[in-house]
Image (cartoon, rainbow, N blue to C red):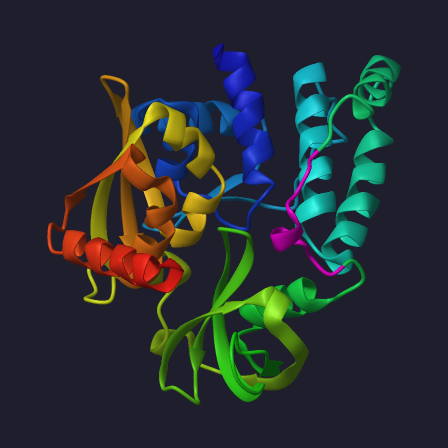
Amino acid sequence: MPRLDRLTAILIHLQTKRVVKAQELADRFGVSLRTIYRDVRSLEEAGVPVGAEAGVGYFLEDYHLPPVMFSKNEASALLFGAKLVDQYTDGSVREGFESALYKIKSVLKRGEKDHIDDLSDQIAVQRSAASAVSGSGTVLSTIQAAIVARHRLRMVYQRQYGTDTEREIEPIGLLHYGVGWHLIAWCHLRQAYRDFRTDRIVRLADTGQPFPARDRLSLSDYLGTLQFTAQLTEVWVRFDEAMARHAQVQRYNFGYVDEEVLDGQVRMRFLTMSTEGLCRWLLMFGNGIHLESPVELRDNLRAYAQELMAHWG
C-alpha cells in the first residue's frame, strides 16, 4: 500500500475506536512498529491532533474527517454484509444495519450507487431451515447491550429434551457456528460457563444488575480454554472425496475444525464434546470413511453398526 494511502487509512482507523494500539495498526497494514511510529509522527506534523498514552495507544483529540468516499470493491463488500445480516441475524440487528447502510449510501458517488443497485439482485444468501433466526425478535440486540454494559440477563431457555428452565446468566460473548448464534455465559443455575443457542431462548430480559468483568473470562479466553479441557475430544477421520462432499454442511454440527486433502481422500479434524453423536453421524457414510483416531472409537462404531443390524434384522 502506498504510504499516502496508508496514512489516510490510519487516520480513518483512529476514528473507529477511543484508543488504538500501535501493534493493532502494524498488524492491519503489515508493517513494522517503527513504520507506524513514523507514520503517526507524519500525521502530527500535518496538524492532526494525535494523542498518545504510553503503554495504552493512540487517540484523536476532537478531530473528525468529513464523510469518506468508497471504492466499488468497498461498496460491494457492504452489499455482501447486508445480505448476510439479512439472513443470519434477527430483526433488531437487521433494522440497525439497514439504517446504517442508508447513511453510508448517501455519501456514495453515483457510480458506486449504480454498482450496488446492479449487483444487488445478483447476490443471494440461502440459509438452511435449521439456521433460521427469528424475523422480528430482539434477542441479539438485548444480548449485545448486556455484554457491553456487563448486566446479568434472566431468560427462559428451551432445553432440547425436557421442560424449559429459567436461568440467570452473565453474558461474555456471542458466537456463530454450526447452524446459528450461540450465547456464551456464566450460568448461575449450573455454576459454570454454558453455551446457549439463541434460537432456544423463549424469553429474555436485562435485569440491570451489573457483574464485575474481572470475575469472568473474555470470549477469546473462553474459546482458548475449550481445546484444553477434558470435555473435548480430538477426532481424525479420512473421507473418500465422493463422501466428503456430502459432509460439507452437517460437519459443523459435530465440531469440525479443519481438513487436508491427501491422495483422493479428505482428512478432517473434529473437536467434539459428544463422541457418541459424532460416531452415530459417521455411520451414514458407510465404507466411505476411515476413523484414524482415537482408535477406541472404532469399537463404538462397530457397536452402533451392530445395533442397526439387530434392529433391522
Q: Residue at x 24, y 67 (%)?
A: 231
Q: Position of residue 116 (x, y in %)?
A: 81, 22
Q: Residue at x 51, y 19 (%)?
A: 6
In magenta stretch: residue 43: no
Q: Main secondary structure of the magenta part?
A: loop
- Residue 260 falls in image quadrant: top left
- Residue 24 falls in image quadrant: top left
Q: Position of residue 196 (x, y in %)?
A: 50, 70
In the image, is 53 to the left or to the right of 261?
right
- Residue 78 falls in image quadrant: top right
- Using the rendered image of the protein, determine whether residue 221 is visible from the camera's viewpoint: no
Q: Position of residue 65 (x, y in %)?
A: 70, 32
Is 160 or 304 nearer to us in this picture?
304
Q: Position of residue 51 (x, y in %)?
A: 49, 43
Q: Residue at x 55, y 68 (%)?
A: 147
Is 129 or 6 nearer to us in this picture?
129
Magenta region, residue range:
125-134
- Residue 233 drawn above or below residue 240: below
**Quadrant where the C terminus is found in the figure:** bottom left
